[in-house]
Amino acid sequence: MKTLQYVVITIATLFLAACGSQKVLVNYKANAEQAELTGNYEEAVTAWESYFTQKQGENAQIEGAVYADAAKTAYKADMSTKALQWFEQAQYNDYVDKEMAEILIDIYRSRNNLSKELEELEFYTENFDSDKIEKNKRLFNIYFDINMFDKALSAWERIPNDSIEEEATIEKFFLINKKRENDEVVDSVSLVLLEKNPKNVDALEWNAMKYYWKAENKYRREMKKYEQNKTGLQYVFLRKELKQVTADFKIALSYFEKLWEMNPGEKYAPYMANIHTRFDEDEKSAYYRKFLNQ
């Protein structure tokens, strides 16, 4: 009889102990969630740590979603290292959600970890939202910086034109198309850049060189034609064509003058000297030639 009583007491004790242990586990998790609801993120992180320690001590499986929830709390508590550790555990357990991916992007960007940020951005756009404007802007800029121009242009196509305001971003698009010799696109984008910033050097140089060589090449062609056939009719035709040459040189000069204000010297001097030579303005031409080979 005593033996039976002992067995009953032992079983009851073990059952109560098990229930008490389970209660502790539930309370750690519940405490973490409650602390987060009240904005006590650091307290919530401490509760999550206790929860994980208890579960790991029992060799119990922890779902990836639970690690992700804890990581989001750590991120709110400005504990990015802890958040990253728990997010990695969530990934190890094959879990990821949209908010988690967004936070990982922010963490890696804040740490200047470009390769990991790019990896997360690509995952985000491929799995959650391919049309997120800010994400595609960031992808475009990263792809440009690492010379992946095809991917940069693909990201650009997913960005609405009216949402691109940053001069630096537009300039990168300008430079990619310049490298690809997409002259029509470059012409158009250069004017957009100059609307945003009349002193944008790349856009000014593009237009200065465009009109300069248009005029200079036409001048040389027409003068060669006249030299080969010095007739009255050819001279009339020459004078007509030189009017367009002069107009284009004037446009080129207007761009060069802006560039000269910002950077006077050898870089622009030969073009400006030659333009004034074509205008038979020898004194002005001589002025700019003084800057050559200095």
Image (tube, helix red, strand yellow):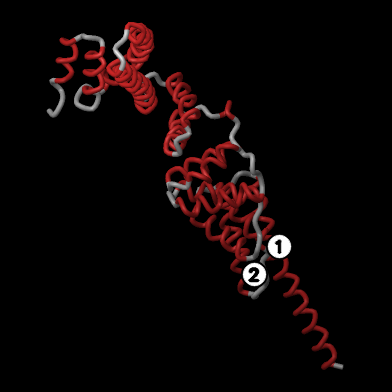
> Which mark is on residue 26?
1
> How many neighbours does mark 1 have within 10 angstroms: few (below 14), some (14-19), or many (20 or more)?
few
- Residue 1 sits above or below residue 242 on the image: below
Reply above or below: 207 against 243. Answer: below
Rendering quarter of residue 198: top left
Q: Nearer the viewer, residue 152 or 77?
A: 152
Dot 2, how many residues are within 10 Å of its Cα: few (below 14), some (14-19), or many (20+)? some
Q: Is residue 79 visible?
A: no
Label 1 residue SS: helix
Residue named by callout 2: 55
CB within 8 Å, label 2 to label 1: no
Amino acid of disc 2: Lys
C-alpha gap between disc 2 and disc 1: 11 Å
Nearest to N terminus: mark 2 or mark 1: 1
Identify whether 130 is placed above or below 292: below
Q: Residue at x 60, y 38 (%)?
A: 158
- Numbered disc in front, either 2 or 1: 2
- Which numbered disc covers residue 135? none
Q: Position of residue 267 (x, y in %)?
A: 23, 27
101 left or right, relative to 245: right
Of residue 77 and residue 241, the one placed in the foreground of this image is 241
* Residue 193 seen in the current view: yes
Residue 88: image location, x then y, percent? 56, 61
Secondary structure beneath disc 2? helix
Please tell me whether residue 57 is drawn above or below residue 180 in the rendered image: below
- What residue lies at 35% left-to-right and 14% top-to-bottom? 245
Query: Which quadrant of the figure contains the N terminus?
Result: bottom right
